[in-house]
Amino acid sequence: MKCLSCKYGDMKEAKTTYFAQLNHCYVIIENVPCLKCDQCGDEFFAASVAEKIDSILDSLEKIASKIFIMDYTTAA
C-alpha cells in the first residue's frame, strides 16, 4: 500500500508510541500497532486499533492522575 500523505513510500507494519493530552493528565501508550511510511514516516492506525485507543483513553480519563504510561499489548 502506498502512503496516503507523500504518495511515494510504502506502508509497512510497525509499532509506535501514542501520546494524548486529556483534561487532567497525559497518556502515553507504547507498542501500538500501525502502518508506517518508509519514506516520510507518517503513521496510519487500523479502525480497530483507533477504537481500542479511544476505549483506553475513555477509561483512563476517569482514573489517571497526571501522567499514565501503558503498553498497548497488555490492554488489547
Image (spheres, grey):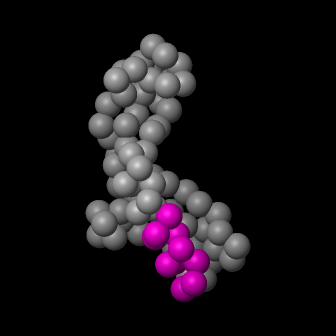
Residue 7 in sight: yes
Whether residue 21 sits left or right of residue 28 in the image: it is right
Q: Is residue 53 magenta?
A: no
Q: Quadrant of the N terminus?
A: top left
Give x and y (percent) for residue 44: 45, 39
Q: Which residue occupies the extreme right position in the image?
A: 23
The majority secondary structure of the magenta stretch comes to helix
Q: Which residues are magenta?
A: 54-63
Please determine whether, in this image, residue 76 is positioned above or below residue 3.
below
Give x and y (percent) for residue 51: 44, 59
Residue in the image at 42% along x and 28% along y: 37
Whether residue 4 sits left or right of residue 11 in the image: it is right
* Rendered image quadrant of residue 10: top left
Please determine whether, in this image, residue 31 is positioned above or below residue 12.
below
Residue in the image at 40% along x and 34% along y: 36
Please determine whether, in this image, residue 33 is positioned above or below residue 28.
above
Q: Which residue occupies the extreme top position in the image?
A: 8
How many numbered marks are there? 0
Residue 32 in sight: no
Give x and y (percent) for residue 4: 49, 25
Q: Quadrant of the C terminus?
A: bottom left
Q: Is residue 62 magenta?
A: yes
Whether residue 32 sits left or right of residue 66 in the image: it is left
Whether residue 65 sits left or right of residue 29 in the image: it is right
Residue in the image at 54% along x and 24% along y: 5
